Amino acid sequence: MIEFNPVSEASAPGKIILFGEHAVVYGRPAIAAPVSQIRAIATVTHSSSNNCYLVAPDLNRHDRLQDLPDDDALARAAWLVLGVAGLTQPPDVTIRVRSQIPIASGMGSGAAIAAAIIRALAQHLNRPDLQTNEQVSALTYEVEKIHHGTPSGIDNTVVAYEQPIWFVRQSPKNLIEPFKVAAPLRFVVADTGVRSSTKVAVGDVRRQYNQQPAKFARIFDECGRIAQVARQAIKAGNVEKVGQLMTDNHAWLQKMTVSSPELDKLVDAALQAGALGAKLSGAGRGGNMLALVADEAMERQVSTALQQAGATNILTTILK
């Protein structure tokens, strides 16, 4: 008989992709990092209602788990844990989810929410084997298929391991290498305010690749090369080189057609304000961009410029 924990809580961070978005789907390397100050939090509490409820105030949701369709991401996260735990019926609990991570903005909101639910429910079931980074990442990946269609695996990896990673999608097992940062990297993250579907953007890039394989293979190769050089620059503490490579990467993402006028405007504003480099981050077509800054003074200057250029939300994260 399972001895349930009466109250269990877990969280997962947001994420940013520093280099290699979209190209990572096609086997090129990518670098990603957590944004730990914004998080998704899941709390599982015992309920006397003889039912399992999923409550997400941010999404205006209060649903019975058994009533939700198979393609509901929150329900999928819960059922995956229950399935691996060998339970065909959910326990009498309320799963409450809240998130500080903007939705559809390239910061891994869906992956973070799923990972938080998975950890909290596994904790409630007293299953430490289901709370390991590897297992949480694997289960979150299954949920990511609902959000993205063909996920690269990078979002679930970053939010589960919560550390900077070098990632290469490959068979039979993805290459995942946590790495050290020689010198702190200070990023200003700015939201365009335009929501963007990763699934649609990834699907559109796939369509274009199928139509023009040679052109897009070259674009992916260049993004992969930039990621390779960036890894060495990060390891060497060459912050200026990292910035230059970010701007170069953005140019190739423009060629990939995943930027947007709003993203380009913010990237240009950041560079004109003195940022060391800037690029979109994530699926593109909206969502967030990153600007690398040298210090707090440059951070304030760039943040002001981004706000004036129309950014709807701005935060700073330091990778170290």
Image (spheres, rainbow, N blue to C red):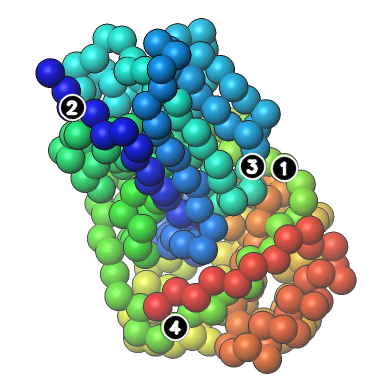
Three-letter amino acid code of the residue under disc 3: Ala
Residue 34 in the image, given as x and y percentages of width and height? 44, 60
Q: Is residue 43 left or right of residue 291?
A: left
As displayed, is residue 35 above or below residue 193?
below
Circles 1 and 3: CB atoms closer than 8 Å:
yes
Residue drawn at x 41%, y 48% is 11
Name the mark on residue 104.
Answer: 3
Q: Quadrant of the C terminus?
A: bottom left
Residue named by callout 1: 195
Which of these two is toward me, 22 or 190?
190
* Of the two numbered discs 4 and 2 in the rendering, the one whose residue sits closer to the viewer: 2
3D distance between C-alphas at marks 4 and 3:
28 Å
3D distance between C-alphas at marks 2 and 3:
37 Å
Q: Earlier in the sequence, mark 1 or mark 3?
A: 3
Badge 4: residue crowd in 10 Å (few <14, some 14–19, many ≥20): few
Three-letter amino acid code of the residue under disc 4: Pro
Residue drawn at x 45%, y 29% is 95
Residue 5 in the image, given as x and y percentages of width and height? 26, 34
Residue drawn at x 35%, y 84% is 182
3D distance between C-alphas at marks 1 and 2:
42 Å
Residue named by callout 2: 3
Q: Earlier in the sequence, mark 4 or mark 3?
A: 3
Three-letter amino acid code of the residue under disc 1: Arg
Residue named by callout 4: 184
Circles 2 and 3: CB atoms closer than 8 Å:
no
Circles 4 and 1: CB atoms closer than 8 Å:
no
